[in-house]
Image: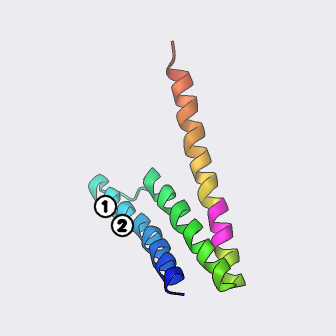
């Protein structure tokens, strides 16, 4: 059980770091922004927390993290798609 508690705390730490980076980037910009790293920490933390929720057999936690992962992945898809489009548009 101690191992799974460590996994849970690691997941929660990664998930929480997204807010730290969002706050730092917003402070630097002087406005509210959501940096790309926010979504990477969201996916990483969400995936680890989903594994923990599955181990705990907690359906509320499982549904919440599963739905969140879909949203985080979709945001990363939009970011990657826009970068690819920009790269193609910049070619001569």
Please give the name of the residue rendered at 27% of the width and 55% of the height, measured from the top-left corner.
28
Q: Nearer the viewer, residue 3 or 86?
A: 3
Tell me where residue 15 appears, x and y as whole percent.
Answer: 47, 69
Please give the name of the residue rendered at 51% of the width and 67% of the height, measured from the top-left corner.
45
For label 1, the crowd category at 10 Å Cα-Cα, with few meaning under 14, some 14 to 19 and many 20 or more, is: some
**Is the Cβ of the residue at disc 1 closer than 8 Å to that at disc 2?**
yes
| 66 within the magenta span | yes
Residue, disc 1: 24
Please give the name of the residue rendered at 69% of the width and 83% of the height, measured from the top-left corner.
60
- The quarter of the picture where the N terminus appears is bottom right
Specify start and end residues of the magenta stretch as a single range.
Answer: 65-70
Q: Nearer the viewer, residue 58 or 27?
A: 58
Disc 1/disc 2 C-alpha distance (Å): 6 Å
Residue, disc 2: 20
Please give the name of the residue rendered at 49% of the width and 86% of the height, measured from the top-left corner.
2
For label 2, the crowd category at 10 Å Cα-Cα, with few meaning under 14, some 14 to 19 and many 20 or more, is: few
Tell me where residue 58 appears, x and y as whole percent.
Answer: 68, 85
Q: Secondary structure at mark 2?
A: helix
Residue sitting farthest toward the left: 28
Q: Is residue 73 above or below residue 66?
A: above
Q: Nearer the viewer, residue 30 or 34?
A: 34
Tell me where residue 16 appears, x and y as whole percent.
Answer: 43, 71
Tell me where residue 49 appears, x and y as whole percent.
Answer: 57, 74
Q: Secondary structure at mark 1?
A: helix
| 34 within the magenta span | no
Q: Is residue 78 above or below residue 86?
A: below
User: How many marks do you count on the picture?
Assistant: 2
């Amino acid at each position: 059980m101690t191992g799974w508690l460590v996994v849970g705390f690691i997941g929660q730490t990664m998930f929480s770091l997204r807010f730290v980076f969002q706050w730092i980037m917003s402070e630097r910009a002087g406005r509210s922004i959501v940096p790309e790293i926010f979504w990477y920490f969201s996916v990483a933390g969400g995936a680890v927390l989903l594994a923990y929720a599955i181990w705990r057999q907690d359906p509320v936690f499982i549904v919440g993290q599963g739905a969140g992962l879909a949203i985080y992945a979709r945001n990363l898809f939009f970011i990657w798609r826009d970068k690819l489009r920009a790269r193609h548009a910049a070619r001569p």
